[in-house]
Amino acid sequence: MHLSATQKGAVGESVVAARLILESDGRLAPYVPFADDRGVDLLVLDKQTGRTIPLQIKTRTGTVKRKSICHFQVRSATFDPRAWLLAVMVDYAEGDVRIKMAWLMPMKKLSKITKVNKRNNYVIRPSPNVDSKDMYTPYRCRDMAQVVSRLYSALEA
């Protein structure tokens, strides 16, 4: 048997939540909303400031064929300009789950750098190459420690 896309997404979200706790040494507390009707996958509470950031998490396991870019979609129906997008490349190898690369951006920026496509989705296609200089480079995080650092900055602003 193989994992379905839904199962892979659920595992990826769980790994992200665990990594946020570990990398923040317990300062960040991610919660799953009771009802996910706005596309928010995690509410991340900063125990130090008492502030919360809603995160929509998108996971991918690889790049688009013949191109070294990742493809993430946010449905316009779940687009919330108050939320943040955390797009992650996940590696499921030999029973282990590892986050290879991440992009963290406020959703309000997403609507400025990409348009809604024919299927009514916002699409981003960032390069996971650490040397790339695409429009998503300012949002690229080489690891979850950098994601946590950027979340702290947003929570303390």
Image: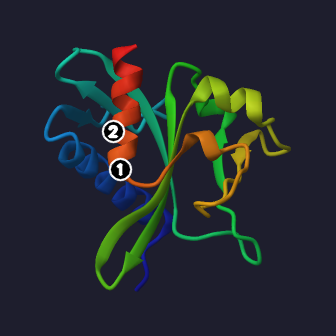
Query: Position of 68 compared to 103: left or right?
Result: right
Secondary element under disc 2, as helix, strand or loop, is helix
Residue type at the position of mark 1: Met
Front-most of 111 and 156? 156
For residue 51, above or below residue 14 = above
- Please give the name of the residue rendered at 65% of the width and 27% of the height, measured from the top-left corner: 109
Residue 108, position in %: x, y?
63, 23
| Image quadrant assignment for residue 67 | bottom right
Image quadrant for the N terminus? bottom left
Which amino acid is tagged 2?
Val
Q: Residue visible at 52% across and 69% down?
A: 61
Q: Which residue is mark 2?
A: 148
**Residue at (47, 70) in percent of width and height:** 4
Residue underneath mark 1: 144
Residue at the left extreme of this rendering? 26
**Picture coordinates of residue 53 (x, y %)?**
38, 24
Q: How is the image coloured?
A: rainbow
Residue 124, above or below 152: below
Residue 81 has which mark? none
Which residue is painted at 24% across and 24% down in the image?
46
Q: Secondary structure at mark 1?
A: helix
**Mark 2 to mark 1: distance in Å?**
6 Å
Q: Looking at the picture, how far across and down is residue 22, in whole percent?
A: 19, 48
Return the x and y of residue 147 as percentages of the image width and height. Answer: 39, 42
Q: Is residue 24 above or below residue 99?
A: above
